[in-house]
Amino acid sequence: MFGLETDIFILLAFSILAACAFVNGFHDTANAVATVIYTNSLKPNVAVMWSGFCNFLGVFFGGIAVAMGIVNLLPVEMLIDQDVYHSIAMVFALLFSAIIWNLGTWYFGLPSSSSHTLIGSILGVGLAFTFMPENSTGAGVNWTKAEELFMSLLTSPIFGFALAIIIMFLLRRLLSKPLREVIFSEPKKNQPPPMWIRAILVMTCTLVSFFHGSNDGQKGVGLVMLILIGIVPAHFALNNEVDPAELKGELVRIEQTVGRIDSTKLSASDRVKLNSIHHEIASLRTHIDKPLVNHEIAQEERMDARRSVLLISRNTKTILDNGDATLNVEDKEYLKMQSASGQGIRRYTDYAPDWVILMISLSLGLGTMVGWKRIVVTIGEKIGKQHLTYAQGASAELVAASTIGVSSALGLPVSTTHVLSSGIAGSMVASKGVKNLQGGTIRNIVIAWVLTLPVTMLLSGTLYAFFRWVF
C-alpha cells in the first residue's frame, strides 16, 4: 500500500490504530451522555449509540477548520527530512504521550481535557525539534496558531462557568414555583423524569454530541492527517482533488496584490516575510508549470509545494495582522481569504479524505460505549455536594453545546470536558454558592487541567528525542 516497505507500512498502520485509540470517545464523549444517563432520561446503551451517531454527523458535516488548526500547529513540512523514521519518531512521541496521559486521567475518573493533551503533545515534539542540531530554521512550533488555540482553550471554560450561573438565575426568576420544584429536584433512582424534561435533556445531549463531533472529533481527523502527511507525504501532502493548474490565476493575483505593499513602511521582519512570499510564489510556479501527469504534482515535489502554499498563506496573514500593509479594503480581504483554512490556495493543503473522517467518527462512537461510566459518575455526583438536578444538567449541556458550536464555526478547538465540567460547577455555585462544590474533586480536576500541558509537552519531547535515537 502506497508503495511502502513492509516495516514502514506496519508502523503506519500501528500509528493510525493508536490515533483511533487516543480519539477521545472513551474520555471526552462520555461528557455528552453524562447528564442524560445520570438523570435516567435514556438507557446507557441507547444514549451512547445515539451520541455516537450524532458525533458521526458532527464530524462528517462539521468541516475541517478545527482539524487543520491541529495540523498547522506543528509546521510538519519543516520537520520532515529524507529519513522517514524521523517522521515516525515524531508520530510515536505525540501518540504515546497523549495516550498515557489520557488513560491515566480516565482511570481515576478525572474529566481531563483530551484537547489539551493532544496540543501539549504536539507542542512538546515541536519544542524538542527546535533544539535538534540539524534544525537550521529555528522553527518547531507555529506560535501564532499556538497562541490562538491557547486563548480559545483558556477562555471557553470561564465563559461556560459564567453562562451556567446566568441560566440558572434566569430559570429561578422566570419559572413558576411548581415548575421550579420539578426541574430543581434530583433524579429518582431508576425512574425517568417527566416527558417534557426528558425531551429537553435528550435535545441538549444531541446538541452536545453533534457539536462535540464538529470540534473534538475534528482533532482526531487532524491527528490522523498529521500522521499521514508525516509518514507518506507523497500521497497526502496535497489534495489530489484539486487541479494544481487552478492555482495559477490566484498566484498571479496574490503576487500583484502584495506587490502593491509599500515595503518601506514595513518592519524589518515583515520585509523578510514579504520577500519570502515572492520567493515561495516563484517556487510554487516551478512545480505547477511543469507538465503534470494526471493533473498532479510529482510525488517527490509535493512536500515542497505544500511548504510554499503554507508559507505564502502564513506570511501574508502575519503582515496583515501587524497592520502596516498599505492596501485597500478589497486587497486586504482577498489576502485574508487566502490565509483562511480551506479557501483560496489553502484548499490545496487543507483537506481530509472521507475515509479518515468516517474512521474517526466510528472511533468516537465505539469509545463512548467502552468508557462512559467513570466520567458519568464524576460529572453527576462528584463535582457538587448535591446530586445533579434536571435544571443543572440541562443548563450545563446547553452551555457546552452553544460554546462548542460557536467555536467550531470560528475554527477554534475547545475542550468539551472543560466547558461541561465548568458548566456543572457554575450550576452548583448558582444553587448554593461555592460551598456547594466538592473541594477534593475540584482540586483534582484543576490539578489535572494545570498539569496536562506541561506534562504532555515534557513527555512527548523526551519521547521524540528517544525515538530519534532509537530509529
Image: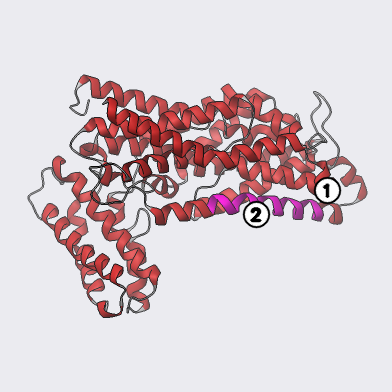
Q: Position of residue 167 (x, y in %)?
A: 75, 53
Q: Which amino acid type is shown beneath numbered disc 1?
A: Gly
Residue 243 appears in the figure: no
What's the residue at 57%, 48% (across, down)? Answer: 404
Residue 259 shown in magenta: no
Q: Considering the image in quadrants, where does the N terminus appear?
A: top left
Q: Considering the image in quadrants, where does the C terminus appear?
A: top left
Q: Say which quarter of the image contains residue 27.
A: top right
Q: Which amino acid type is shown beneath numbered disc 2?
A: Phe
In whole angstroms, how far apart are the C-alphas of marks 1 and 2?
18 Å
Residue 255 appears in the figure: yes
Q: Position of residue 184 (x, y in %)?
A: 85, 42
Considering depth in this image, is 108 or 258 the residue closer to the camera? 108
Range of residues picked out in magenta: 152-170
Asked if residue 275 is positioned above or below residue 32 in the image, the reply reads below
Q: Say which quarter of the image contains residue 87.
A: top left
Q: Which residue was labeled with disc 1?
A: 433
